[in-house]
Amino acid sequence: MEISVAIIGSGPAGFYAADALIKNADDAQIDIIERLPTPYGLIRGGVAPDHQTTKKVAIKFEKTALKDGLQYFGNVEVGRDVTLEELREIYDVVILAIGAPADRVLTIPGSDKIGVHGSAAFVGWYNGHPDFVELAPDLNVDAAVVIGNGNVALDIARVLVRSSSGRAKTDLPNYARGAMDASPIKDVYIMGRRGPIEAKFTNVELREMLDLTECAPIVDAADLPEFIPENVENRDRRLAKKNLYTLCAFSELDPGAKPKRAHFGFYAMPVEILGGERVEGIRFERTKLEDGHAIGTGEMMDIPCGLVVAAIGYRADPVPGLPYDEVKGIIPNDKGRIEKGLYAVGWIKRGPSGVISSSRPDGVEVVEHIAADFPNGGKKAGRTKLLELLNERAVRIVHFEDWKKLEAAEHHRAEQAQPRQKFTDIDAMMDHLEGK
Ligand code: NAP
């Protein structure tokens, strides 16, 4: 089918959509438009730096990027260099794969104190995302609290308490690795407002806490329920069972066996950040569960700490000119179809949940919508028009071969066991490409 398609966003959802199009629409002309010079979205900027195996999916995405019919337009920002309206005029199909890059905001008194960060910013900082390099959180503290019982909370806690030799094998940028290696943090608290059964950790990630060489995961056995309620079914029940088993193992460990500790705390709702200008602690209210909801009991508990990271989920930014579902934090869509010619995949379609491969079916679904909406293919010029526009506006497009040059330099700069030493500054990337 001849059709011109612009995919906005080069993260997993964008690449899975491109892959599905290539497999099902032979003559599709597919352009992936990415705000940053570098591709792969969450793979580069979200997945934890010590989860290099997960990042290997980029090898598959690279194969997709090199297929005939696909072109990568890095360093092209929709809204700055070209508008969504212009793309819709130029292309038959526009697919939004723009993710959910913002933090769900912690709205308790004191959350504006120095030393309180959202997980998007904190993870972006340690992953070398150019938007967050300036965050430079103060890690010269003894204790940190991570709010939330999801995998992002686990990632943050684990990276903070990993050994220096463990970090040396990651692609943490040198500035973040240096700050963490120099940090005196000995205690990290991972706090959930509900219980272990309701925690959203996946079990492989929870068990990984047992493998840390310098840190003992600990939990109070009194927080572990004796049985799983009948109404927790299927997948949730299997997950809760495995997680309880793992937490039980944590509860039997000697907290003093290793120099650092990751404390798992449950039934604790954050109510106030304590301190002056800087965070000095956090107050939690003990909760009990009613119909699955956390209800405050009035009993308070303070944890002294110099760093708080709220890993309480992400949200998508609204797109000017398009409707936005404030509650779900997505663009309203019918199985990925917003309207004829405009589709959504990944977190902007479903909300911020699931693992990387959860976005794969979204691409397949969108290809089905496109086939139904364009039974005779499309007619718009697509790429040639975009190139004309960007040329007129003197936009320096970073093509895929440019990215490969940046990537080669990142490998070249890597020290010893590091997989890469990332560029974290857009000007430095452009200077490298200009041979400066
Ligand atoms: P998440 O799984 O939705 O977890 C968010 C956590 O924040 C929940 O425990 C939630 O508690 C809590 N929370 C929300 N609002 C809160 C508030 N106001 N006060 C206190 N706690 C609050 O989100 P995530 O950790 O950001 O992860 C996003 C997605 O990425 C998930 O699907 C995750 O599995 C995935 N991911 C996967 C990996 C991996 O596979 N290795 C790594 C990272 C992320 P309630 O349950 O009570 O709402």
Image (tube, helix red, strand yellow):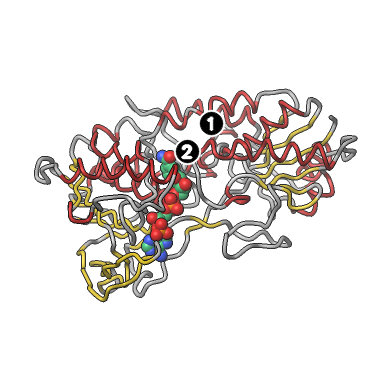
- Say what secondary structure mark 1 lies in: helix
369 relative to 103 in the view: left or right: right
Looking at the image, which residue is at 69% across and 53% down? Answer: 333
41 relative to 148 in the view: left or right: right
Q: Position of residue 38 (x, y in %)?
A: 56, 38
CA neighbours of label 1 inside 10 A, class few (<14), some (14 to 19), many (20+): many
Q: Say which amino acid is labelled 1.
A: Leu
Q: Looking at the picture, does residue 58 appear above or below residue 9?
A: above
Q: Position of residue 45 (x, y in %)?
A: 48, 43
CA neighbours of label 2 inside 10 A, class few (<14), some (14 to 19), many (20+): many
- The foreground one among 68 and 436 is 68
- The foreground one among 81 and 15 is 15
Q: Position of residue 107 (x, y in %)?
A: 42, 70
The N terminus appears in which quarter of the rendering? top right
- The foreground one among 274 and 236 is 236
Q: Are marks 2 and 1 in contact (CB under 8 Å)?
A: yes
Q: Say which amino acid is labelled 2.
A: Phe
- Residue under pointer 1: 406
Looking at the image, which residue is at 84% across and 49% down? Answer: 89
Q: Looking at the picture, does residue 423 appear above or below residue 108?
A: above
- To which quarter of the image does residue 30 belong? top right
Is there any visible trace of residue 150 in the rendered image?
Answer: yes
Q: CA distance from mark 2 to mark 1?
A: 8 Å
- To which quarter of the image does residue 279 belong? bottom left
Of the residues under marks 2 and 1, which one precedes in the sequence?
1
- Residue under pointer 2: 423
- Say what secondary structure mark 2 lies in: loop
